[in-house]
Amino acid sequence: MQCLIWLWDHESGWNPRDWNDRSTACGIPQACPCSKTNNAYKTDWKAQIDWGIAYINNKYKNPCAAWNHWKNSKPHGY
């Protein structure tokens, strides 16, 4: 759980209405494009979390692997 907390602290600050103008990612998990969550960012933080966890498990296998990928893809001092 701690890795998920760190990841989403850095991605969105757990803000369900967070929006990235550069990438058009949105919501707590920063879905890109935002339509991947069926625009749940507008109304449903629970759906965002469910989608984000499923995405992480599918792509990275677990939140710690996703967090490590995130850290390794950012410049030092993230």
Image: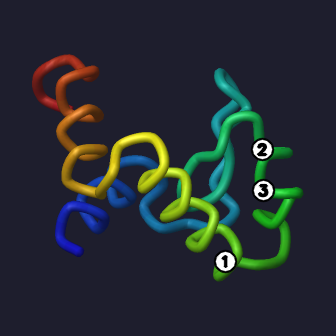
Q: Give the distance between the C-alpha atoms of the residues marked 2 and 1, in whole angstroms.
A: 13 Å
Q: Quadrant of residue 43?
A: bottom right
Image x and y of residue 51, in percent:
63, 63
Image x and y of residue 36, in percent:
78, 47
Q: Residue at x 12, y 29 (%)?
A: 77
Image x and y of residue 49, in percent:
56, 71
Name the kind of residue labelled 2 in the image. Cys
Residue 62, above or below 19: below
Q: Point out which mark residue 34 bears.
A: 2
- Left or right: 20 as drawn, with respect to 24: left
Q: Give the distance between the C-alpha atoms of the residues marked 1 and 3, in whole angstroms.
A: 10 Å
Q: Point out which mark residue 45 bears.
A: 1
Q: Point out which mark residue 37 bears.
A: 3
Question: Can you name the residue that lies furthest to the left here?
Answer: 76
Quadrant of the rendering where the N terminus is positioned: bottom left
Name the kind of residue labelled 3 in the image. Thr
- Left or right: 9 as drawn, with respect to 75: right
Front in this rendered view, residue 64 or 7: 64
Front in this rendered view, residue 47 or 57: 57
Q: Point out which mark residue 28 bears.
A: none
Q: Residue at x 22, y 45 (%)?
A: 65
Residue 31, above or below 12: above
